[in-house]
């Protein structure tokens, strides 16, 4: 990045963005387009964040379709491209599919990284500038960095959930973490015990199937296959689960691990069953801790969730206890949303948190990038239910909001914010999905300070612009 890496010298800015992964790039892009005096700094030497080295077996979980029922670069195309960042300029849209071939609908890590680099050409960043500590006062923050001090009224931390985290299991310190697992071929002919049955654990299992003699995954909670089948990460889980179901070399155990002991030629794992009680005494040639990651929060002093691994956030991704400290990227999962049907937000993934970053930037700037004309209120809302990629990417989490008298577009907002906040008479519509996978419109009408929630019926083709939906919505808005 020669020629631009010494931008944003230490000094005072309205906002400082820390990080040059997709979350930082997206937040910085929208802040600058909103006219905010923003400086973006990164400890890395290049853009891309975690995609510079992970996933370790190179293939992502989220997909981008080269051909879709709409034109690449349009708003509707975002529905079919889960990996590109958002932009106002046509030349900055749909950049990840432009790097992909047609051999796989899921991009490789290198293709994803190249798409991020293409986007970053339009987002100035001061690279090689490491955030080290923080001071707070009435005016905001002073970020102490390896290059000097940055003052700002608000800071956006796009740090990723990238710091390896280990469960407090005796002996776990003797085994490598997912981040240090190494090449798949190094496990050829071995029995491998994987601690964890979430994304990284099944990514390891999927990558090791062609090499390992046996793969054993264990964690206390069972895999929720009903929820998994409806998620974007299902592709990673299915082959190991199929192998386990057919009695192959894979085992998926619901077990709490008590301790790990190093032996002369491998490891001994002692555990006890959870869904089916009973002891386990297992031997393995190798053990890998796929126990997750945490956010490197340093001295921010923010409240956390998920065993202290992720910052606790308001619906607009601001720290619940440190005003002015915002979080972008996959750390925005610290704002849980309503989780009405047990389905969480898509904020850990690019296709979810890219929309969060735009709303966060508008929140900080105090204004929006655009506002739709509302001539036909019912038609406008139904079109959003049918076509809006934000509502489909973040089901039950983001909603389109419109005031009622007069009808005025209030943009996309977190549903949790609309439900909890006071305000004028308004309606919010969102796409929701229940635990069985049924997709339906959720309508939230606020009148006189009282909120009425209505779930409309599903439709097989998800065509929510049909006449029966128009009649139902008209009745609700009267």
Image (cartoon, helix red, strand yellow):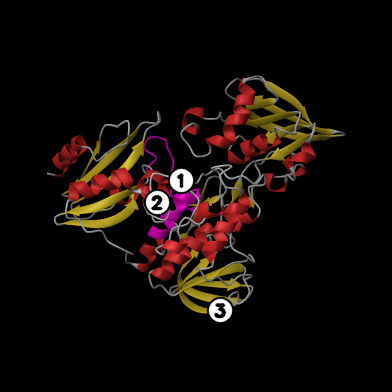
Residue 399: x percent and y percent?
32, 48
Q: Which residue is mark 3?
A: 10
Quadrant where the image shows the C terminus: top left
Q: Which residues are magenta?
A: 332-359
Residue 450 visible? The answer is no
Residue 294 screen position, x and y as percent: 59, 50
Q: CA distance from mark 3 to mark 2?
A: 42 Å
In the image, residue 476 lies in the stretch drawn in magenta: no
In which quadrant will I find the N terminus?
Answer: bottom right
The residue lying toward the viewer, choosing from 376 and 311, is: 376
Report the Cα–Cα distance between label 1 and label 2: 8 Å
Q: Which mark is residue 67?
A: 1
Residue matched to label 2: 71
Residue 459 appears in the figure: yes
Cα–Cα span, label 3 and label 1: 45 Å
Number of residues whose C-alpha sits closer than 10 Å to that of mark 1, classed few (under 14), some (14–19) or many (20 or more): few
Provide the secondary structure element on which disc 1 rests.
Answer: loop
Q: Name the residue nearer the viewer: 256 or 9.
A: 9
Comparing labels 3 and 2, the label whose residue is closer to the camera: 2
């Amino acid at each position: 990045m020669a020629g631009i890496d010494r931008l944003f010298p230490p000094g005072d800015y309205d906002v400082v963005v820390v990080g040059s992964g997709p979350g930082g790039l997206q937040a910085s892009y929208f802040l600058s387009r909103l006219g905010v005096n923003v400086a973006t700094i990164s400890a890395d030497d290049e853009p891309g964040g975690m995609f510079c080295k992970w996933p370790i077996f190179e293939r992502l979980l989220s997909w981008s379709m080269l051909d879709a029922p709409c034109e690449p670069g349009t708003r509707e195309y975002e529905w079919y491209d889960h990996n590109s960042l958002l932009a106002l300029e046509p030349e900055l849209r749909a950049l990840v599919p432009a790097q992909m071939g047609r051999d796989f609908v899921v991009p490789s890590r290198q293709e994803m990284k190249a798409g991020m680099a293409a986007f970053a050409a339009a987002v100035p960043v001061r690279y090689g500038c490491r955030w080290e500590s923080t001071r707070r006062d009435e005016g905001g923050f002073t970020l102490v960095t390896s290059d000097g001090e940055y003052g700002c009224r608000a800071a956006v931390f796009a740090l990723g959930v990238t710091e390896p985290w280990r469960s407090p299991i005796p002996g776990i310190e003797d085994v490598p973490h997912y981040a240090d697992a190494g090449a798949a071929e190094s496990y050829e002919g071995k029995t491998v015990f994987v601690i964890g049955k979430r994304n990284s654990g099944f990514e390891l299992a999927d990558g090791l199937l062609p090499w390992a003699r046996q793969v054993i995954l264990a964690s206390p909670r069972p895999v929720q296959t009903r929820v998994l089948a409806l998620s974007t990460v299902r592709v990673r889980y299915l082959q190991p689960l199929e192998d386990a179901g057919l009695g192959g070399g894979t085992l998926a155990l619901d077990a709490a691990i008590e301790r790990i002991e190093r032996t002369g030629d491998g490891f001994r794992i002692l555990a006890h069953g959870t869904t089916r009680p009973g002891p386990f005494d297992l031997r393995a040639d190798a053990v890998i801790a796929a126990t997750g990651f945490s956010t490197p929060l340093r001295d921010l002093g923010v409240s956390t969730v998920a065993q202290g691994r992720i910052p606790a956030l308001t619906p607009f991704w601001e720290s619940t206890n440190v005003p002015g400290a915002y979080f972008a990227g996959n750390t925005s999962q610290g704002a849980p949303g309503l989780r009405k049907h047990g389905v969480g937000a898509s904020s850990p993934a690019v296709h979810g948190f890219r929309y969060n970053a735009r709303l966060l930037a508008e929140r900080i700037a105090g204004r929006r990038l655009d506002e739709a004309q509302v001539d036909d209120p019912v038609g406008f809302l139904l079109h959003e239910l049918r076509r809006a990629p934000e509502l489909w990417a973040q089901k039950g989490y983001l909603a389109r909001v419109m005031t009622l008298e007069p009808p005025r577009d209030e943009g996309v907002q977190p549903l949790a914010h609309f439900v909890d906040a006071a305000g004028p008479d308004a309606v919010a519509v969102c796409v929701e999905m229940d635990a069985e996978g049924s997709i339906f419109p959720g309508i939230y009408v606020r009148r006189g300070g009282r909120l009425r929630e209505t779930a409309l019926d599903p439709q097989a083709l998800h065509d929510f612009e049909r006449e029966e939906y128009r009649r139902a919505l008209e009745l609700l808005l009267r």
